[in-house]
Amino acid sequence: MRTGRWLWRGVLTLLVLTALALLATYVVLRMSLPQLGDRATLPGLSTATSVTRDALGVVTVEAGDRLDAYRALGFVHAQERYFEMDLLRRSSAGELAELFGESAHWRSIASNACIAFAREPGATSIC
């Protein structure tokens, strides 16, 4: 009878830990989404600037001068494309295996070989 009770506790503990892991994953992924409806303060703006999105998600930036518009557009771009920019950076640096594991190992080796070849004096890149 004691074995059944310990088995039940083990299964229950495993279910609770799985639920907590799924909740933590959801929260982390949810935090990485862009802020769509909130107000955000962006340092370095000289005039009032607003960023709005229509029903299709198309961004409209309204600013008092061009520099503020560029800064706000860069903020929106970085917010919406962070994963893609990080993926491209890791790919060109040969670090995809760190993110995706063994399945991307050969891609990282090829990128690192291209980087090493390109650093040789007088080398013309074939990658």
Image (cartoon, rainbow, N blue to C red):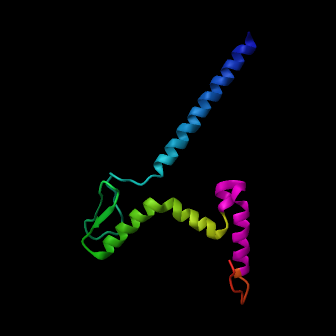
Majority secondary structure in the magenta region:
helix
Residue 45 location, x and y as percent? 31, 69
* In this view, 45 is above or below 12: below
> Can you say whether 110 is above or below 35 in the image?
below
Q: Name the residue rendered at 24%, 71% in the picture.
A: 64
Residue drawn at x 73%, y 80% as measured from the top left? 117
Question: For the point 61% across and 28% down, which residue is it?
Answer: 15
The N terminus is located in which quarter? Answer: top right
Residue drawn at the location 61% of the way across and 32% of the way down: 17
For residue 40, what is the image quadrant? bottom left
Q: Is residue 22 left or right of residue 111?
A: left
Q: How many marks?
A: 0
Image coordinates of residue 46 in percent, x first then y, are 28, 71
The quarter of the image holding the C terminus is bottom right
Magenta stretch holds residue 45: no
Residue 124 is drawn in which quadrant?
bottom right
Residue lying farthest top?
1
Q: In which image quadrant can residue 104 be found? A: bottom right
Residue 3 rendering spot, x and y as whole percentages: 75, 15
The picture places residue 59, in percent across and down from the top left corner, at 33, 62
Residue interval drawn in magenta? 96-117
Q: Vertically, is 108 above or below 120?
A: above
Task: Give yes or no for residue 101 being in the magenta stretch.
Answer: yes
Query: Is 32 positioned to the left or the right of 36 in the image?
Result: right
Residue 51 falls left or right of residue 112: left
In this view, 118 is above or below 95: below
